[in-house]
């Protein structure tokens, strides 16, 4: 754009993500392009490379351009949900391919890997993400894909992305990082060596708990990326234009929201760290957290809004989730409003999460209201 310096900081690029001055109306944000099909010119060639909405039309491609820029990626694709992106990526696996994934991470991704093991005969090994040496020891010469999530649900264990990339690449495997909890304002997973970075855009990117979205971005636009792009089209997993537009709007405040959520979460973590009614606080921003040193290196702009509190009894945890008045008892994360969740109750009987654990997604509210709310609920809990 004329008159603009060509390399603005990422926070500025995100804030101006929808910057667009319409020649006719002067509108400062673009309209949402809802068309499902696009007319051809006199030579029957697509006018602007758009053909059909299942490939991703103008609004979807605009979101992808912004995301690729913020991730420092060769390309980005936006999907109808995080799981749509996960399933599409895993669809590239062949029978016999060996996949290494975390023992504890997003349950939907684990469940789908187990499904592919049963139905397609992929080989699957899990590693303990809280043990720094475990990943390297689980990767074999046959490994094709390594899946890590950092920080990971719900203990916020931190995996060293650079080390994971080194171990994966040593055997020719690819590394996927689920960086939903650490968006590019704090962690640039591709710069640290990941081949793909994944986000549930439903969370911090959207930021307002009003869309479902999934994002994949790649370090290299190679043949496998081409296959993922084709699969998204064939499966019809693309995001809808209206949601793509809301996703872009969410990105405009991502840096501000993440900074505030991180600040609030750190204050809450410190407040409850030595509280008589709390057994343990799990937050990578606390120096006592086992992953703190790695987090301090790879989360450069805040440790995020996700933390877990462990109570002394399961009944106290259940009560706390019922008695809050500001925190909303709901699943999900990364919205402007704070949520509280009894994770084991949500994950079901197979969950390895302790039943004294509450997962908190800290929003952007005034932090004293959040602390006072937890205090009053703890006061009443049995
Ligand atoms: C929510 C979430 C997903 C799945 O994304 P959806 O948008 O709900 O499909 C994957 N990974 C993590 C870490 C998540 O929090």
Image (cartoon, grey):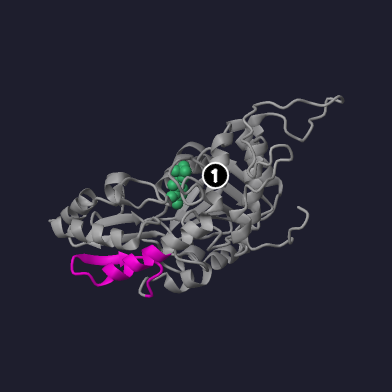
Q: Looking at the image, how many numbered discs can be counted on the residues?
A: 1
Residue at (24% x, 50% y) in the render: 325
Q: Which residues are magenta?
A: 263-287
**Vertical placement of residue 85 versus 6, above or below:** above
Query: In the image, is residue 243 above or below residue 166?
Result: above
Kindly tell me whether residue 204 is visible in this rendering: yes
Image side of residue 341 versus residue 27, left or right: left
What is the x, y in percent for residue 47? Answer: 79, 32
Task: Out of 154 and 80, give the one closest to the viewer.
Answer: 80
**For this rendering, which residue is in front, 193 or 186?**
186
| Residue with the mark numbered 1 | 247
Residue 108 percent coordinates (x, y): 42, 44
Residue 4's x, y, as percent?
74, 58
* Dot 1 beta carbon under 8 Å from ligand 1: no
Q: Position of residue 139 (x, y in %)?
A: 53, 60
Q: In this picture, is 49 found above or below 170? A: above
Quarter location, residue 175: bottom right
Q: Is residue 362 magenta?
A: no
Which residue in the rendered view is the most extreme toward the front?
A: 25
Can residue 190 be seen here? The reply is: no
Q: Quadrant of the C terminus?
A: bottom left
Name the side, left or right, on which 14 lies relative to 348.
right
Mark 1 closeness class: few <14, some 14–19, many ≥20 residues within 10 Å: many
Q: Residue at the far right: name it.
A: 43
Looking at the rendered structure, the secondary structure element under dot 1 is helix
* Outermost residue to the left: 382
Magenta stretch holds residue 267: yes
């Amino acid at each position: 754009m004329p008159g603009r310096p060509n390399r603005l900081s990422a926070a500025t690029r995100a804030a101006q993500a929808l910057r667009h001055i319409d020649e006719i109306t002067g509108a400062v944000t673009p309209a949402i392009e809802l068309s499902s099909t696009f007319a051809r010119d006199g030579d029957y060639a697509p006018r602007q490379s758009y053909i059909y909405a299942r490939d991703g039309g103008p609004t979807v491609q605009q979101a992808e351009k912004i995301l690729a820029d913020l991730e420092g990626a060769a390309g980005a694709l936006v999907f109808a949900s995080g799981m749509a992106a996960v399933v599409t990526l895993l669809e590239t696996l062949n029978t016999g391919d060996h996949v290494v994934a975390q023992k504890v991470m997003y349950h939907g991704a684990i469940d789908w890997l187990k499904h592919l093991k049963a139905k397609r005969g992929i080989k699957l090994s899990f590693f303990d993400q809280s043990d720094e040496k475990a990943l390297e020891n689980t990767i074999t010469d046959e490994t094709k894909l390594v899946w890590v999530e950092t920080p990971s649900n719900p203990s916020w264990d931190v995996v060293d992305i650079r080390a994971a990339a080194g171990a994966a690449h040593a055997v020719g495997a690819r590394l996927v990082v689920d960086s939903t909890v650490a968006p590019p304002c704090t962690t640039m997973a591709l710069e640290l060596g990941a081949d793909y970075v994944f986000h549930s855009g439903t969370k911090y990117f959207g930021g307002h708990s009003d869309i479902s979205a999934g994002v994949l971005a790649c370090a290299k636009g190679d043949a496998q990326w081409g296959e993922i792009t084709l699969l998204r089209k064939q499966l019809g997993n693309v995001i809808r234009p209206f949601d793509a537009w809301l996703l872009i709007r969410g990105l405009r405040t991502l840096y501000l929201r993440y900074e505030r959520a991180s600040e609030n979460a750190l204050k809450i973590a410190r407040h409850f760290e030595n509280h008589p009614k709390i057994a343990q606080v799990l937050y990578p921003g606390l120096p006592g957290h086992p992953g703190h040193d790695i987090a301090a290196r790879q989360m450069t702009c805040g440790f995020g809004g996700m933390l877990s509190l462990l109570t002394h009894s399961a009944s106290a945890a259940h009560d706390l989730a019922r008695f809050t008045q500001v925190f909303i008892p709901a699943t999900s994360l990364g919205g402007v409003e704070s949520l509280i969740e009894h994770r084991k109750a949500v994950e079901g009987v197979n969950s390895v999460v302790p039943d004294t654990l509450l997962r908190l997604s800290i929003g952007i509210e005034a932090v004293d209201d959040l602390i006072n709310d937890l205090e009053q609920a703890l006061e009443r809990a049995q």
